[in-house]
Amino acid sequence: MKSIVLPERYISIINKIAITAKENNFDVYIVGGFVRDLFLNREPKDLDIMVCSKSQVEYARLSGINFSRILAKKYNLHEHVVFERFGTSKLFIDNEEVEFVMPRKEYYESDSRNPDTSLGSLEQDALRRDFTINALFFRLSDMTILDFTSKGLDDIKNKTIRVTDPSNAKIIFNQDPLRILRAVRQSLQLGFSIEPVTYEAMKASAKRIEIVSPERIRDELNKILTESNSSKAFLMMDDINLLQKILPEVARLKNLGQPVKYHIDDVFMHSLKVLDRTRDNLALRMAALLHDIGKFKTYKKDSDRISFIGHDIESTKEAEVILKRLKYPKDFIAKVCVVIRNHMYLKMYTKYWSDSAIRKLVKRCDSEFDLVMKISKADYGKVNDANKLLELNKRIEDLKSKNMLYPKEEILSGKELMGIFNKPAGKWIQTVKNKIEELQIENPQITKDSVIEAIKDLNIL
């Protein structure tokens, strides 16, 4: 068996836990994905410690809570946070969050994925977990790995995701269908395959995802979208009929043809390829996934000619609905929608555009211009089109270097405008400011006096 090497940043924390456990007659184990990642040479996170009292059997359900209280007192830590229902508590030790838990059994109601719990054995705790690779226990007293499923170590070695109890695979996913999405995500993250019994159970239970809260689905999608080659996860979700449940707007893009002149793939595969060609930014990757969903509603075929006129606007509307449904923050939704709404405008660029037209484009995209540029590059399929973006970017940089890209900051205040027009404050001020902004976009170097002359003729009554 491979020897365990603890990450440097966790050594002090684990030593404190092990010493305190020995002094106070507790058995402690590192459990879950942290142990898996140690074997995979991945940087682990989410340190969970299972605590068993050797002496106070009648208080065994409170072992994790009691141990964290002792630990906090010994090392003068902030008060622990207690979750009575699950018999768990959390502490910050050396700036890392550590959760302390009891070994437990779980009981599920048919309409909820949130279980009731009771004290269980170590083996019962291992079997109530999702996958064998996440059910390994690392005992700190003698640095021993416990593999109660007898498959965890082998599955790590063979790069396999398997439920802890294959004979009850469907029940495991029915009880908590979020595990289906976690299996997809971990398969992508780790580069593991899903063994057939587990995969078929995922497929059979996909419709149960409706009992999972939108927030939890959102969090898993975010993790998937921050991985490279995210398309693999969405193809798997489609194959097991999960995509149709959580993102039906994306699933319906399958087999929706496009003009061969522009794209050789249907809209679904094209969207996934654009997704894989983007990097790093979550809003950008979400925009890449959703940038063409409006094509389903705008699809028109006249003889052999296919068009999607207005799909950027329709895609923006659809994206907003989807992201609200999944409970994304308002500022995130706004950012994604700006990117989607403007991803087609950069494609309209020609070398004949005026400088003011370029300034209007940059203004239209606002602070998300860089993301719009990135998605446009990812969306293009032809070298000539990509060269157009390079030329546009060069012109933007030239204007920026000459201080001719962005208008100056507010050239006339509301107070000054009231004096010029001899009028009290009102909505008219914003009307005038909008006109001033147009003048500045036409000529960023326009003087204050020239602006005053230009606006004096405005009819603001």
Image (tube, rainbow, N blue to C red):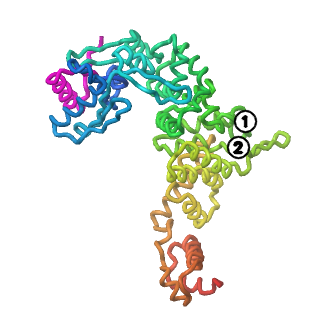
Q: Secondary structure at mark 1?
A: loop
Q: Residue at x 20, y 15 (%)?
A: 142
In this rendering, the answer to whether 7 lies above or below 355 is above
Please give the name of the residue rendered at 53% of the width and 22% of the height, measured from the top-left corner.
173
Q: Residue at x 44, y 19 (%)?
A: 131
Q: Position of residue 177 (x, y in %)?
A: 53, 27
Coordinates of residue 443 in the picture (x, y in percent)? 55, 73
Element type at marker 2? helix
Pick the quarter of the image with the N terminus. top left
Residue 295 numbered tag: 2
How many residues crowd around disc 1 within 10 Å: few (fewer than 14), some, or many (20 or more)? some
Q: Residue at x 50, y 29 (%)?
A: 113
Residue 233 in which image quadrant: top right
Judge from the rendering whether residue 195 lies leftward or rightward of residue 44; answer left or right.
right
Task: Please tell me whether residue 341 is drawn above or below residue 215 in the rendered image.
Answer: below
Q: How many marks?
A: 2
Q: Amino acid at mark 2?
A: Lys
- Name the spot of residue 75 as percent of width and height, x first: 16, 36
Answer yes or no: do the residues labelled 2 and 1 have beta carbons within 8 Å? yes
Q: Which of the numbered marks, if any, corresponds to residue 256? A: 1
Query: Which residue is situated farthest in the front direction here?
Result: 58
How packed is label 2: few (under 14 Cα within 10 Å), some, or many (20 or more)? many
Q: Which residues are magenta?
A: 1-29
Left/right of residue 418 with respect to residue 315 in the rendered view: left
Q: Is residue 70 above or below residue 370?
A: above
Q: Nearer the viewer, residue 319 or 349?
A: 319
Per the model, the C-alpha gap separating discs 2 and 1 is 8 Å
Depth order, front residue of 331/302: 331
Q: Can you tell which quarter of the image residue 64 is in?
A: top left
Query: Is residue 460 found inside the magenta-colored segment of the image?
Result: no
Q: Amino acid at mark 1?
A: Leu
Disc with the residue nearer the chain's start (2 vs 1): 1
